[in-house]
């Protein structure tokens, strides 16, 4: 079996009617896709390859965790009528020297064969700054992997989407090749829409959650400063609570209880301490991690 056969594109799971993002972010995505769509005309027919031999076909979605970057990548593939090939750093890395670079080549080859959108999540692990001081074979492999990724970006004719919540760690050589799109945390109005698509049916999603008459989406959106992922967790938790207690429907109190549990969990994590190490050191590490992922 060829190495590229391990990477299998799939049908996208989301469309843009289920991805709630700011109009600014949506417009930026559409502008980037237009740039890619007209790349051949502008750079080949109009000759702009003279000034830019390798026009970008790669998008970079960056923002906090849970704000819709992965869903938007799926929605882009859906809108273009393409499959999506999801890849993470774990799919690429290898303990054997040189294998990571070969896996990068294989992922791009697989996406090209199926004309699929290549989506690379947790991209900061792959696109971070190359090591200036190489002291081991592992360091050499890391630099080789990143150099190979640059080569693939320059020659790939399809669409690549990277996603990260640590864009500041990117190597500038990658940033200059990407069309970056910021994903903002949802405001109250956006949160209201996110609650709605997770609780009520839409044209493309036939949700059948039995909701009580007292469910107030506006109140939930105003009270809880959640991202989309947290809202999804709250809905699932409330539904499980209702089913396990054999209740006829999901009530506002169940949704509120689920939200409060998520808030409490976040507070507990911020206070977390490992008693096997000095408190201050551990709290510092936990705080840094939470800042990166919230």
Image (cartoon, rainbow, N blue to C red):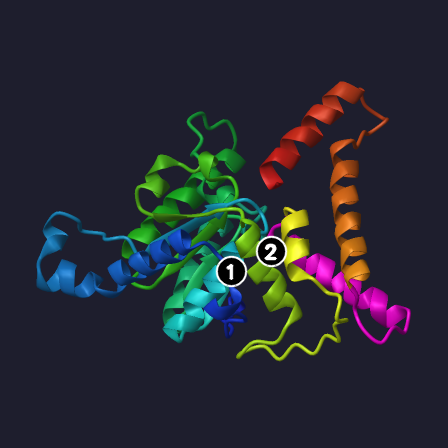
Residue drawn at x 21%, y 64% is: 38
Q: Is residue 152 left or right of residue 212?
A: left
First along the sequence among labels 2 and 1:
1
**In front here: 235 or 72?**
235
User: Picture coordinates of residue 55 (x, y %)?
Assistant: 23, 53
Task: Please state the horizontal and vertical placement of residue 190, each as a whole percent of the image.
Answer: 53, 55
Hey, which quadrant is residue 48 in on the image? bottom left
Which residue is rendered at x = 73% and y = 58% of the image?
Answer: 234
Q: Identify which residue, 221 or 292, lies in the foreground.
A: 221
Instruction: Kindly indicate whether the residue at mark 1 contacts the one at mark 2 (C-beta within 8 angstroms).
Output: yes
- Whether residue 231 is visible here, answered yes or no, is yes
- Taking 233 as reference, is 150 above or below it? above
Decide whether residue 177 is among the magenta residues.
no
Residue ID for mark 2: 228
Instruction: Tell me the magenta residue range.
Output: 226-251
Mark 1 burial class by Cα count in 10 Å: few <14, some 14-19, many 20+: many
Q: Is residue 269 left or right of residue 223?
A: right
- Across and down, in percent, residue 108 comes to 40, 61
Q: Residue at x 74, y 72 (%)?
A: 211
Is residue 87 at all visible to an observer of this figure? no
Q: Residues within 10 Å of mark 2 (few under 14, many from 20)?
A: many
Instruction: Report if residue 242 lies within the magenta region.
Output: yes
Cα–Cα span, label 2 and label 1: 8 Å
Assign the C terminus to one quadrant of the image: top right
Would you identify the image quadrant in which residue 274 lies? top right
Q: Is residue 188 left or right of residue 32?
A: right
Q: Position of residue 227 (x, y in %)?
A: 60, 51
Residue depicted at x 46% and y 61%? 73
Relative vertical location of residue 215 with respect to residue 246 in this rendering, above or below: above
Which residue has dot 1 on it? 20
Depth check, front residue: 105 or 242: 242
């Amino acid at each position: 079996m060829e190495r590229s056969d391990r990477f299998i594109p799939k049908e996208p799971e989301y469309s843009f009617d289920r991805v709630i993002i700011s109009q600014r972010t949506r417009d930026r995505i559409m502008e980037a896709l237009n740039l890619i769509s007209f790349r051949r005309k502008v750079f080949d027919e109009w000759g702009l390859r003279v000034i830019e031999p390798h026009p970008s076909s790669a998008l970079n979605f960056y923002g906090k965790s849970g704000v819709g970057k992965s869903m938007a990548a799926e929605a882009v593939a859906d809108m273009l009528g393409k499959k999506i090939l999801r890849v993470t750093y774990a799919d690429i890395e290898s303990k054997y020297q040189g294998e990571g670079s070969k896996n990068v080549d294989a992922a791009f080859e697989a996406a090209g064969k199926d004309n699929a959108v290549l989506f690379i999540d947790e991209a900061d692990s792959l696109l971070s700054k190359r090591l200036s001081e190489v002291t081991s074979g592992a360091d050499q492999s890391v630099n080789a992997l990143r150099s190979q990724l640059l080569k693939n970006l320059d020659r790939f004719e399809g669409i690549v989407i990277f996603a990260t919540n640590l864009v500041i760690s990117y190597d500038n050589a990658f940033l200059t090749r990407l069309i970056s799109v910021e994903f903002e945390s949802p405001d109250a109005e956006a949160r209201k829409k996110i609650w709605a698509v997770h609780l009520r049916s839409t044209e493309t999603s036939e949700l059948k959650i039995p909701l009580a008459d007292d469910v107030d989406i506006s109140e939930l959106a105003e009270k809880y400063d959640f991202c989309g992922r947290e809202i999804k967790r709250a809905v699932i938790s409330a539904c499980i609570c209702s089913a396990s207690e054999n209740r006829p429907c999901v009530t506002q109190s169940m949704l509120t209880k689920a939200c409060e549990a998520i808030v409490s969990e976040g507070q507990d994590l911020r206070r977390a301490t490992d008693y096997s190490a000095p408190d201050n050191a551990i709290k510092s590490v936990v705080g840094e991690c939470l800042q990166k992922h919230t």
